[in-house]
Image (cartoon, rainbow, N blue to C red):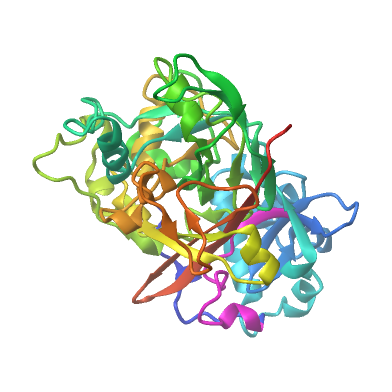
Amino acid sequence: MPALNETHDLNLRSWVVSANAADTDFPIQNLPFAEFRRKGSSEAFRGGVAIGDQVVDLAAAAQQGLFSGAAADGAQACAQPTLNEFMAMGGSVWSALRLALSRGLREGAAEQASLADCLIAQSEVEYSLPCSIGDYTDFYTSVHHATSVGKLFRPDNPLLPNYKWVPIGYHGRSSSIDVSGQEFKRPCGQTKAPDATEPSVGPCKRLDYELEVGIYIGKGNDLGSPIALDDSDKHVFGMCLFNDWSARDIQAWEYQPLGPFLAKNFASTVSPWIVTTEALAPYRAEFSRDPADPQPMPYLSSELNSSEGALDIKLEVLLQTEAMRNRGDAPAKVSQSNFIHSYWTVAQMVAHHTVNGCNMRPGDFLGSGTQSGPEHEEGGSLLELSRGGKEAFTLPSGEQRTFLEDGDAVVMRGWCEKVGAARIGFGEVVSTVLPANK
């Protein structure tokens, strides 16, 4: 796993003044990657790195020849319309570019004048997907979410027998993943009411969000060559926020025997910024299981994974109705959770995904599954917060919700903070529900 180094130093400050604010998501200790261009322009998308409220244009930096060696190679790869080439280069190049940026953005850096010419305000840019996502797998790693949802359908036996033995996942649809700002039409499909004799086709009535963490694969593996648990960080480039929308009523009718289909393939939304595995190193935490539970099998267990396999990432969901937006009201917080509650680590997801020889490629994407905490108010979905649609909750505006209505915008945020380390954040992922096709 990435070791702590000079880029994590709590005392580092940047000549980009906004990066030194206590509440910024993007201090010099973070330096996440995205694909961007100026708003409304016909410019090519290219790679950028966030610093405070600015973006370092890596294409401009590469053109100026500001870096050397592996860092220069990385910057040149980041000048492309996707980050796939850079992600494929592996940890030595990722780390070299991150170090060169850290040194160039520090107070007193000789590169200040040159790098200042490469800055563009985040308020002036728009984003695309950071990479071409070839394959997408969604896991189901929150035991609290699985238990809460399971109780709605199987009160006496909420967890299926395999849950605590194997990281459960299914292959999702990468073509409908889009970047923050995504607007999508309410999905239509077959549903069947409990008292109906046959199903009907129409707009989803129980539309939901799912609070997830997204995981980007960097360097891939050959077909037939599994990734060992303790080698996962050689292959995981970084992480983002992820809203994997769900049509609950469509899912209830279609999911047996093969699992979700139309209920999950209509839209998924990622935050623009990828926070690198290296940047997350200070927030590693101990991973352990309840001694009464089955312990992970040997290919899913190691001393390293037990000592620092978990990640302390604070997560929250906010909701802004159309009426709130029209009045200028800010989104209202509806729940909070933490990725540290995940029943399986990122390394375990990667190791299990490839134990059968499955080959992963740069830009492949893993969803963590809905991240819920042990308390009801930490539910990562409306299905949990409304107890299956039985209990509406009231927003500060006085409006009530059990599931999402047209015009609702969902905002997700995430950040890491601990004593002795700088606070770093993921930005936010925002997306809005539009009316269904008529």
Based on the displayed image, in which of its 4 quarters is residue 186 positioned? top right
Q: Is residue 311 visible?
A: no
Residue at x 76% of width, y 57% of height:
126
Q: In front: 163, or 70?
A: 163
Q: In the image, is residue 333 part of the stretch drawn in magenta? A: no
On the rendered image, what quadrant is the C terminus found in? top right
Residue at x 57% of width, y 72% of height:
28
Q: In front: 25, or 103?
A: 25
Q: Is residue 86 left or right of residue 350?
A: right
Name of the residue lying farthest toward the left: 292
Name the magenta segment's main secondary structure.
loop
Q: Is residue 436 above or below residue 93?
A: above
Q: Is residue 337 left or right of residue 415?
A: left
Residue 134 x, y percent position in the rendering: 62, 30
* Total count of labels: 0
Q: Is residue 78 left or right of residue 349?
A: right
Residue 172 x, y percent position in the rendering: 53, 28
For the record, the magenta segment spans 17-35
Q: Is residue 278 visible?
A: yes
Q: In front: 31, or 327?
A: 327
